[in-house]
Amino acid sequence: WRANRRVEAPLLTGFLDSEATPLVQAYEFKVRLEHILSRCTALTDTIPSAAGEDGLPSTAPVGVAPGLFIGGVLVAGSRKDLKAAGITHVVNAAGSQVEDYFPSDFSYLRIELDDTPEASTAIAATFEISNEFIDG
């Protein structure tokens, strides 16, 4: 399958390179996809506040304190949900990795933080400037 479509797939375990019939390959592919989907469902179940009623990631920000919300890239890209929550200021902790989607609607502060264990110490240095920005 990979060779026919000239697709590089370093994460596959090689089952698509077998000499089995296309029907067997399709079935194996289906089973592997079902396993992946079940794992995704299990992950979503562990963070219900970030999932919508349908189990998919939510675009609604999650309140962590009065007037303070947190959310990922899906939340940042949902003007409707940001406005519905009364959000006026957005701290973009992904920096240049994620754009400021609605600069005409919200005030943005970009902070360059990596999603690594080492960044957990660097985040403390950003608290003062981000708090001043949020308090406006």
Image: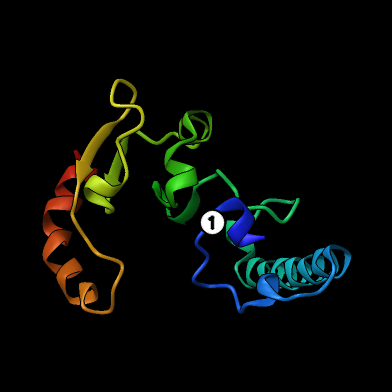
Q: Nearer the viewer, residue 38 or 86?
A: 38
In the displayed orientation, state which residue is furthest to the right.
23
Left or right: 16, with 112 as reference point: right
Residue 4 sits in quarter:
bottom right
Q: Report which quarter residue 128 is drawn in.
A: bottom left
Mark 1: which amino acid?
Answer: Val
Q: Position of residue 38 (x, y in %)?
A: 75, 71
Is residue 135 in view from this perspective? no
User: Could you tell me which quadrant the N terminus lies in?
Assistant: bottom right
Is residue 110 rendered to the left or right of residue 2?
A: left
Element type at mark 1? loop
- Look at the picture and state if 133 lies above or below 23: above
Q: Where is mark 1, residue-wise?
A: 7
Q: Please name whichever residue, 80 or 19, is drawn nearer the observer in this view of the structure.
A: 19
**Where 43 falls versus 103 (above or below)?**
below
Q: Is residue 98 left or right of residue 19?
A: left
